[in-house]
Image: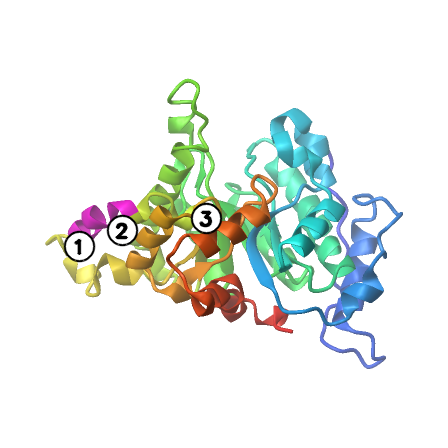
Amino acid sequence: MKRQVGFNDGGAHQPQSASGISRRELLRSAVILGAGSLLPAAGLTAQLASSDSASKAGRIDIHNHLTPPILLQTVGADALGGFAKWTPEQALAAMEQSGVTTGITSVPPHYDPATVDRIARGCNEYAARLAADHPGKFGVFAFMPMPHIDVTVREIEYAYDTLKVDGIGMYTNYGDKWLGDPYFNPVFEELERRKAIVFTHPISADCCKDLIKGIGDGAIEWQTDTTRAIAQMIFGGAAARYPNVRMIWSHGGGTMPYLIERFTGMAKSPRLASKFPGGFEAAAGKFYYDTAQVANPAAMSALTKVVPLSQILFGTDYPARTLADHVKGLKECGVFGPKELQQIDRENALALLPRFRT
């Protein structure tokens, strides 16, 4: 399968041009030229007028999946499960019903190293086009062709310099290596240079697929894998080497909050104490954590004991779970008051993504 033909930058994505055409309009035109085969022609400009008008400030969903056509065509509906049925119209309707103004999109958890470098460009151009067609409604965490280092660095450059994405999306592991492994240093050096936002999502590592018959990896293993990646980033030194890379961990950091006593003890050990003068909590408290699949009293109580409220972001895992589930769960968990909910729902995300401030 051939890589989708991209559009050239040609200076089109500068701020306001001399002709008065906005950066958004130029981006939309450029993406249409480069990814025209990815969306049906009908409906591409629908709702643009209404989208351009200022909308009431609402929630920002940092963990909102989309299914680009090239992904569906490459891996098939069976492999994607419920994600195969995703449509922009359904996503917008769900957001409207739950008071979500903006969804920051990322590719759902499916990983095939044999095809990932062929689909990344098409996925990212589709996501950029979706965002341009619905201004303010969608953001983009670009899909990376990891673990292919050189291709990934080039895709980071294209995603930021041409598509003007909001951040980068990565999985917690790639086969037998977790984020923070020295193998990924060239990628993180580029991300550090750009002070990038990196949204992470767990996926099954080679070691740990289908460990318990009848229990899907998403129920247990993915939360553990997130914890492995957090531990690797911190104890392996990557978090300190790349302090300007702003990491977001899905699902409340997985099992990390429940292992805090063990991690705290490790950070205080003679071997590591000099590297962690503020302890493990100080290092973990610099990361961000979303509320997807953990909007409940136990998880939110634990997470707030480990990290500051400023580091918690509203996320839903849509369409794997509904937005309404998370709005209800956070309101009823008994951990947050109205002001704290507003901070989680919107304000914390705006600190990372100020362009969505209305």
User: What residue is disc 2 on?
Assistant: 235
Q: CA distance from mark 2 to mark 3?
A: 19 Å
Query: CB atoms at circles 2 and 1 under 8 Å apart?
Result: yes
Q: Residue furthest top?
A: 213
Say what secondary structure mark 3 lies in: loop
* Type of amino acid at the residue the image marks with label 3: Ser
- The quadrant holding residue 9 is bottom right
Q: Quadrant of the C terminus?
A: bottom right
Q: Is residue 26 above or below residue 250?
A: below
Q: CA distance from mark 2 to mark 1?
A: 8 Å
Q: CA distance from mark 1 to mark 3?
A: 27 Å
Q: Earlier in the sequence, mark 2 or mark 1?
A: 2
Judge whether residue 262 is colored magenta: yes
Viewer-closest of 39 and 65: 65
* Type of amino acid at the residue the image marks with label 2: Phe
Give the image location of residue 343, x and y in percent.
47, 67
* Type of amino acid at the residue the image marks with label 1: Leu
User: What residue is disc 3 on?
Assistant: 250
Disc ID at residue 272: 1
Give the image location of residue 92, x and y in percent.
71, 52
